[in-house]
Amino acid sequence: MEIKVSTEKGARPITVIHVDGNIDSASYQEFQTKAEGLITSGARDILIDLTNAHFVSSAGIRAFHALFNKLRELSPDLSDEEMRKGINAGTYKSPHLKLLNPSKEAMTTFEMTGIDMYIGIYTDLKKAISSF
């Protein structure tokens, strides 16, 4: 797996993590460590570009969830109870973490695990950037 990082200009700077390769049990730790390092360095709005990551395993899902929690701790937008109610009602998506261009297989995984219920998923870069 190869990870590249760029910054896009939106309402505020958006850190884009471009993943080339699968995020699975062999690579999720490298991915998570890199992303957490960016957060430690000040990234608060992250878009993960999955255009070249055709498979995301349960280990990858755990990494996304860990990043969601880390960003939420740094910039809480709602109470835990309000967030849970919003997720259940379909009205809450993370304001700080989004996904771009997942494969059909990865999208199936996101839907089966429910990660699509609280992390926004986009197929257009401009729409993803403007959603922050």
Image: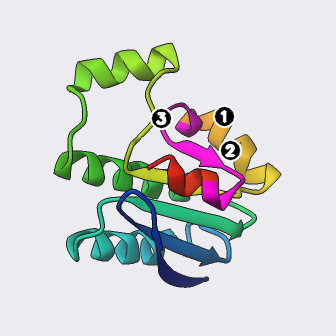
Closer mark to the observer between disc 3 and disc 2: 3
Q: CA distance from mark 3 to mark 2?
A: 14 Å
Write down the residue under mark 2: 109
Instruction: Give the left or right position of residue 108, taking residue 70 as reference.
Output: right
Instruction: Give the left or right position of residue 44, taking residue 95 as reference.
Output: left
Residue 120, compared with residue 14, is above or below; it is above
Do callouts 3 and 2 mark residues in contact (Cβ within 8 Å)? no
| Colour convention of the picture | rainbow
Q: Is residue 119 magenta?
A: yes
Q: Residue at x 40, y 19 (%)?
A: 86
Q: Is residue 49 magenta?
A: no
**Three-letter amino acid code at the position of disc 2:** Thr
Q: Residue at x 25, y 18 (%)?
A: 81
Instruction: Give the left or right position of residue 45, taking residue 24 as reference.
Output: left
Closer mark to the observer between disc 3 and disc 1: 3
Helix, strand or loop at disc 1? Answer: helix
**Three-letter amino acid code at the position of disc 1:** Met
Write down the residue under mark 3: 118
**Three-letter amino acid code at the position of disc 3:** Tyr
Residue 92, compared with residue 101, is above or below; it is above
For the residue carrying disc 3, how many other residues have a C-alpha within 10 Å: few (<14), some (14-19), or many (20+)? many
On the image, the x and y values in percent for residue 93 come to: 45, 35
Q: CA distance from mark 1 to mark 2?
A: 5 Å
Do callouts 1 and 2 mark residues in contact (Cβ within 8 Å)? yes
Residue 57 visible within the image: no
Residue range (magenta): 115-126
- Considering depth in this image, is 112 or 12 the residue closer to the camera? 12
Write down the residue under mark 1: 112
- Residue 48, by quadrant, is bottom right
Residue 1, compared with residue 60, is above or below; it is below
Helix, strand or loop at disc 3? Answer: loop
